[in-house]
């Protein structure tokens, strides 16, 4: 039997450390907003002959588009992003590219107004908030026969926030290095992380509930530890099978939905960690009123008296 | 119990065959209907978001106005011969139009959202206020007073039977008929304007003939029932007649997003996702069989059943497959085995306490049920909220698609992981295989 609950401070430290790094990265790198968030023209092109990225860049610069963003896909396709262009300019540019590199497939076809994506993000944030409230209510209801059912819901929400923050932060590190931008697929991925996170946490809580009912007089800390050990294999196996599928998506579908798969991958790892080591251990801290350990430096009536 | 289980097994087999028949062939639907539908992002096509200008509409009439716009758009799109066009209200004042598999020209795009209102005008003197100005002069709307109200003459008084035709000399005519109110207005205005020019305008622009000159015929006689406009090109006359018949938009529309999705990426993406899905399923099956042995193998069979059933449901419910939807589906494969993992872990614990296989299966399923129920209900709650939010925003389609496919996936996985796996496992109860506990649990150590 491994003593997990006894080492809870370590796990909290790990999480706090990772979250700090994530917050710093979010502050330093931030998240590059995709074309959906700013108006512009975008196209995906596939050339018949092989074209190198620097050749394409040089050509676009020589045509006067030094602000063009070019991204190369593994299969040789390029994604080119430019500020909004008029139809005539687009046609000129397409003609120029044909003269230089030969026949290609694709045309400047995407025109977006930033309003839509910004609104989508805002609505997604609202959705997450409403979903969190829904989850809180349901878990509190599902654990209503337990003492203090609200705590289970609250700890599950902490786990959600934990996972979402880490997914955002780690993505901003990757994005900062590889120049990835966030798009609507990223937001979908973030939403998936939230669904996954809750699912995992509830399974662990369910085991705690069952063990509490079986031996209501045991020490809460021991019950949580036993429940963790009993669900460990399940948590790891489910995460593993999901990671297998997500990796298959990442490797075989690639850049089209890489935002989605990478966010999901980070989120699954963070979610597995938080469902085992954060949410249940927070319950223990709460039960033991261990919060005082963290707030000792605040003087209270009782402590000043003694 | 065994007899009941055999019946359940036969029912499962039948359902599997039915699901297979529904899924294959992929490109043909049930009873010769449509095949698997691909969303706009996979198939290519046109995606336009319009914003309606509701400033002139009372708040109580906004819903009616938007519905009117959608009806007119639908009338205009139908003749284009697009299969499964999407016309959806998004938020309070936006309309999403998606034309899968159809590229439209800028001209078509414009005519799709044009108000389609022809207005008639008369020339004004220098010092008077004008609404239009062109090479023929300055114009104001031709009006008449009816029942004490000033009314302008326009095509909203046309009957919906306007058509383009040629007369005996080959001239192109746009022939229209006034409704009751229109004929009174027309009678009054044309009798007042005999010998004067009657200008015709569409929006801010005069209607121009084939030669590019504004069309402004001189009123020869009093017009009461019907009239004709000459000088248009055939294409223009046909377009106008179609638009006038389809009805005019109650408010003006602005294009706020406009995208022609190229299917280049889409076709490849479908192949790649199918590949990823098959490889993902195969690897999960391999893992499950290695780790959980016989039950794992059975869970793998349920997983195949799961994949087939979900595809069949997509087809029956005509859910279009989109990028996000495929993402949700593939993700749900990973999560689909979760219920089985929960159950098998429980079974292992029960076998460790020395129970027989039958008892262990029962206890494993019963005791894992609360965890499966609570974790899946929370996922359903999240899916439900995502779907609801996705449906209310302009570009919510990916969010909706994801929520829907994940919901279906999780729901079906509860059925396959619980009912199907249990039925298949029961087939082994009482056979000699059931004695070989290492088939059921590789790391089994009986507790003393």
Image (spheres, coloured by chain):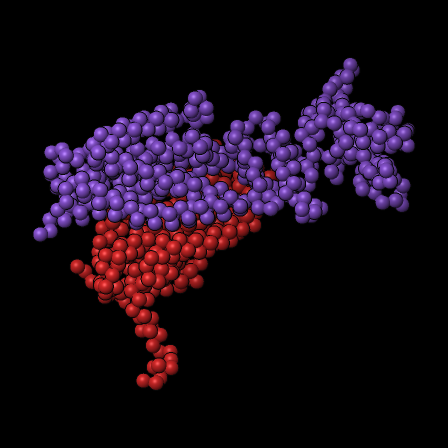
Chain colours: A red, B purple
| Residue nearest the observer in this picture, B193 or B387 | B387
Residue A206 location in percent, x, y? 30, 53
Q: Is residue A230 left or right of residue B83?
A: left
Residue located at (37% from left, 64% from top) = A20
Can residue A34 be seen by looking at this rendering?
yes
When asked about the image quadrant of residue A241, the answer is top left
| Residue nearest the observer in this picture, B378 or B150 | B378
| Farthest residue, direction top | B168
Residue A28 position (above or below residue A48): below
| Farthest residue, direction bottom | A305
Residue B315 position (above or below residue B409): above
Q: How many marks?
A: 0
Residue B169 location in percent, x, y? 78, 15
Residue A126 position (above or below residue B255): below
Residue A95 location in percent, x, y? 54, 36
Give the quarter of the figure containing the N terminus of chain B: top left
Can residue A159 be seen by looking at this rendering?
no
Residue located at (29% from left, 69% from top) = A288
| Farthest residue, direction left | B448
Residue located at (40% from left, 56% from top) = A136
| Residue nearest the observer in this picture, A2 or A62 | A2
Residue located at (76% from left, 23% from top) = B175
Residue A262 location in percent, x, y? 36, 49
């Amino acid at each position: 039997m491994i003593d997990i609950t006894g080492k809870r401070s370590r796990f909290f430290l790990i999480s706090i450390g990772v979250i700090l790094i994530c917050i710093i990265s979010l502050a330093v790198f931030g998240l590059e907003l995709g074309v959906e968030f700013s108006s512009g023209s975008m196209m995906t092109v596939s050339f018949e002959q092989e074209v190198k990225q620097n050749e394409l860049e040089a050509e676009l610069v020589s045509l006067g588009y030094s602000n063009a963003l070019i991204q190369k896909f593994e299969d040789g396709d390029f994604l080119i992003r430019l500020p909004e262009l008029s139809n005539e300019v687009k046609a000129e540019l397409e003609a120029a590219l044909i003269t230089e590199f030969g026949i290609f497939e694709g045309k400047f076809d995407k025109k977006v107004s930033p309003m839509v994506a910004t609104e989508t993000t805002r609505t997604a944030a609202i959705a997450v908030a409403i979903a969190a409230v829904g989850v809180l209510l349901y878990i509190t209801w599902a654990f209503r026969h337990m003492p203090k059912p609200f705590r289970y819901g609250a700890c599950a929400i902490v786990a959600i926030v934990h996972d979402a923050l880490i997914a955002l932060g780690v993505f901003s590190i990757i994005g900062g290095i590889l120049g990835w931008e966030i798009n609507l697929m990223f937001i979908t991925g973030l939403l998936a992380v939230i669904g996954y996170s809750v699912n995992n946490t509830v399974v662990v809580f369910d085991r705690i509930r069952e063990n509490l009912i079986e031996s209501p007089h045991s020490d809460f800390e021991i019950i949580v530890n036993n429940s963790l050990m009993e669900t460990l294999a399940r948590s790891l196996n489910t995460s593993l099978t999901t990671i297998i599928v997500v990796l298959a998506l990442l490797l075989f579908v690639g850049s089209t939905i890489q935002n989605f798969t990478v966010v999901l991958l980070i989120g699954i790892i963070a979610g597995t960690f938080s469902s085992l080591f954060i949410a249940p251990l927070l319950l223990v801290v709460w039960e033991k009123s261990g919060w005082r350990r963290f707030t000792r430096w605040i003087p209270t009536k009782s402590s000043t008296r003694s | 119990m065994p007899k009941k289980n055999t019946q359940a097994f036969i029912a499962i087999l039948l359902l599997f065959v039915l699901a297979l028949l529904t899924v294959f062939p992929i490109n043909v639907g049930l009873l010769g209907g449509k095949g698997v539908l691909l969303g706009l992002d996979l198939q290519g096509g046109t995606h336009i978001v319009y914003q309606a200008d509701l400033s002139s509409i009372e708040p109580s009439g906004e819903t009616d106005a938007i519905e009117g716009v959608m009806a007119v758009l639908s009338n205009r799109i139908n003749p284009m011969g697009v299969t499964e066009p999407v016309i959806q209200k998004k938020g309070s004042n936006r309309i999403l139009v998606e034309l899968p598999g159809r590229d439209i020209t800028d001209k078509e795009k414009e005519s799709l959202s044009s108000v389609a209102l022809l207005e008639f005008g008369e020339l004004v003197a220098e010092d008077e206020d004008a609404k239009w100005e062109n090479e023929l002069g300055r114009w104001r709307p031709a009006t008449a007073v009816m029942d004490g109200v000033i009314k302008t003459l326009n095509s909203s008084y046309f009957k919906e039977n306007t058509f383009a035709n040629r007369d005996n000399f080959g001239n192109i005519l746009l022939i229209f008929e006034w409704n009751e109110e229109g004929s009174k207005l027309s009678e009054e205005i044309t009798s007042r304007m005999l010998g004067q020019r009657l200008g015709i305008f569409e929006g801010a622009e005069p209607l121009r003939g084939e030669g590019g000159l504004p069309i402004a015929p001189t009123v020869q006689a009093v017009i009461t029932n019907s009239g004709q406009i000459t000088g248009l090109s055939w294409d223009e006359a046909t377009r106008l007649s179609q638009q006038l018949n389809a009805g005019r938009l109650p408010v003006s529309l602005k294009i706020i997003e406009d995208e022609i999705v190229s299917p280049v990426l889409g076709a490849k993406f479908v192949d790649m996702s199918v590949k990823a899905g098959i490889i993902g399923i195969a690897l999960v099956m391999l893992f499950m069989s290695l780790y959980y042995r016989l039950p794992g193998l059975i869970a793998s069979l349920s997983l195949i059943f799961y994949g087939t059933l979900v595809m069949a449901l997509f087809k029956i419910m005509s859910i279009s497959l989109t990028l996000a939807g495929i993402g949700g589906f593939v993700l749900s494969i990973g999560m689909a085995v979760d219920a089985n993992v929960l159950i098998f872990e429980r079974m292992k614990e029960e076998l460790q306490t020395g129970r027989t296989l039958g008892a262990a299966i029962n206890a494993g399923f019963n005791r894992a049920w609360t965890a499966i129920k609570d974790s899946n209900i929370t996922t359903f709650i999240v899916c439900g909220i995502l779907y609801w939010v996705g449906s209310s925003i302009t570009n919510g389609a990916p969010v909706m698609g994801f929520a829907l496919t994940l919901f279906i996936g999780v729901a079906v996985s509860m059925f396959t992981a619980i009912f199907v796996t249990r039925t298949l496992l029961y087939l082994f109860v009482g056979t000699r295989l059931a004695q070989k506990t290492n088939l059921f649990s590789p790391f089994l150590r009986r507790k003393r």
